[in-house]
Image (cartoon, rainbow, N blue to C red):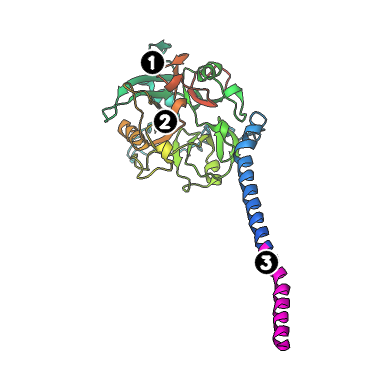
Amino acid sequence: MEENKTRQELREEQLQSQAPRRKRKRKSVGELILQDLLLIALILLSFALVHHVIPRMMKGSYEPPAARDIRPTAAVTAAPEASPAPAAETQPADSSEPETTPEPTPEPTPDPMDWRTKFADHFTDEVVVTDHSYTSPNIAIDIQKYVSDDIAPSTYFVADIYVASLENFQTYWAGGSFRKWMEEDPIQCAKNAGAILAVNGDYADSQDFGLLVRNGELYMEEQTIYDICALYYDGTMVTYGADEYKVEDVLAREPYQIWKFGPALLDENGQPRSSFNATGPISDVNPRTGLGYYEPGHYCFVVVDGRQGGYSAGMRIGRFAQLFADLGCKAAYNLDGGRSSVMVFQGGFFNNPYLNGRNAGDILLIREIEEGEG
C-alpha cells in the first residue's frame, strides 16, 4: 500500500512538472499566430502606402527627370561637294580615230526628304481652309467621318496628313513642360501650341518609367513592359513589342518622338497583329485614338467615338487594328482612349468626345513653322 501510494505521488509530481511545459508550448503557438497577423497587417499597410497614399501625396510635387537633347545637329546631311575632275591631257589631232559620243548626263536622284516636291499635288500656294480640311505650302489635312458597319455601329474620324517637314509634326506638354500629373483642356493645349490639328497623346504625365522622347528631347531611357512607337528624324515610324527592341538600339537611330502607351497594332506586313500586348479593359470596346503611318511625310490620326448609345459604341482593339490595315497603313499605334479620345481642329472639337472629354497631359499636333523656328 505504501509502495502504491508512493508511485501515485510520483506520477502526480511528474504531471505537475509537465504542466508548465505544455502551457508554455500553447503560449508559444499563440505568439506565432499573433506575429503572423501583425506581419500580414504590415504587408497590407505597405501596399496601400506604395500604391495609393504616396502617389496621391506626390501629385503635384513630383520632379520629373531633366530632359536631354538628343536632336541630331542636322536632320539631313548635305552631300559633300565633288572634287573637280583633273584636266584631260591634250592629244594631237588624229583624223583616223572615230569621234566619241558624250555620255548622257544622268537624271538627279530625288531627295527622299524633299517632301514638298514629293507631295506637291497635296499642297497649295496659299492657305486654304474648309470645315474639314486645311492646305498650305507646308501642310495638307483632310478629315473624313465614317460609320462602321459592325454589329454595334461606331462613328470614327480619319485625318489624312501630309507635311513638308517633320517639324510640322510635333508634340506638346500641358503647361508647356513635362510635369507629373500636369493636365489641361486639350483645346487650350492646341491653342497654346499653335496647332491646326491635334489629338490626345499617351498619358505620359502619369508615368515615371520607360522610354520617352518628345520633339528630340530624351526624358526617360528604360526598358518598359509596354509596346512603344518611335518616329525617327528620317520620317519613318516603327512600332516595337515590349520584347522586340533594346533601348540603346532605338536611341542610336536618333528618334524624334517615342510614345509608350500601346499596343502596337500592325505587324511588319501591315496586317493586324495576331495578339496584342494589352489588358482586358484596354482591349474591350472603347473610344479610341491612334496614329498611322504610310510613308515618311504621310501620316494619319484616327479617333473613334464611343460609350454613346444610338450614336457610337466604340471599337475593340482588334477591330481598331483592322481599320488601320484597311486604310493601307504600314504601321499603327494605339494611344490613350476612353474619355481622353479627342480630335481638335481649328480650335474646336471635331469629334464628339465621351462626356465632353477630359484634360490631357500631352497632345500630338500638326502646325505651321514660323520663319526662324527649328
57 on left or right of 338: right
Which label's residue is closer to the chain start, 2 or 1? 1
State the quadrant of the N terminus.
bottom right
Label 2 Cα neighbours within 10 Å, binned few <14 / some 14-19 / many ≥20: many
> How many numbered discs, if any?
3
Looking at the image, which is closer to me, 353 or 21?
21
* Position in image of residue 63 (x %, y %): 67, 33
State the quadrant of the C terminus.
top right
* Position in image of residue 168 (x %, y %): 49, 23
Q: Quadrant of residue 24?
A: bottom right
Looking at the image, which is closer to me, 264 or 288?
288
Identify the element where label 3 is drawn: helix
Q: Which residue is mark 2?
A: 290
Instruction: Name the amino acid, label 2.
Output: Gly
Indicate yes or no whether the magenta region holds residue 29.
no
Q: Which residue is mark 3?
A: 25
Q: Which residue is mark 1?
A: 133
103 lies above or below 363: below
Indicate yes or no whether the magenta region holds residue 3.
yes
* Position in image of residue 27 (x %, y %): 68, 62
Q: Which stretch appears magenta?
A: 1-26
Which label's residue is closer to the chain start, 1 or 3? 3
13 lies above or below 274: below
Determine the main secondary structure of the stretch shown in magenta. Answer: helix
For marks 1 and 3, give the CA distance: 83 Å
Q: Nearer the viewer, mark 2 or mark 1?
A: 2
Instruction: Name the amino acid, label 3.
Output: Lys
Identify the element where label 2 is drawn: strand
Label 3 Cα neighbours within 10 Å, binned few <14 / some 14-19 / many ≥20: few
Q: Residue at x 44, y 35 (%)?
A: 236
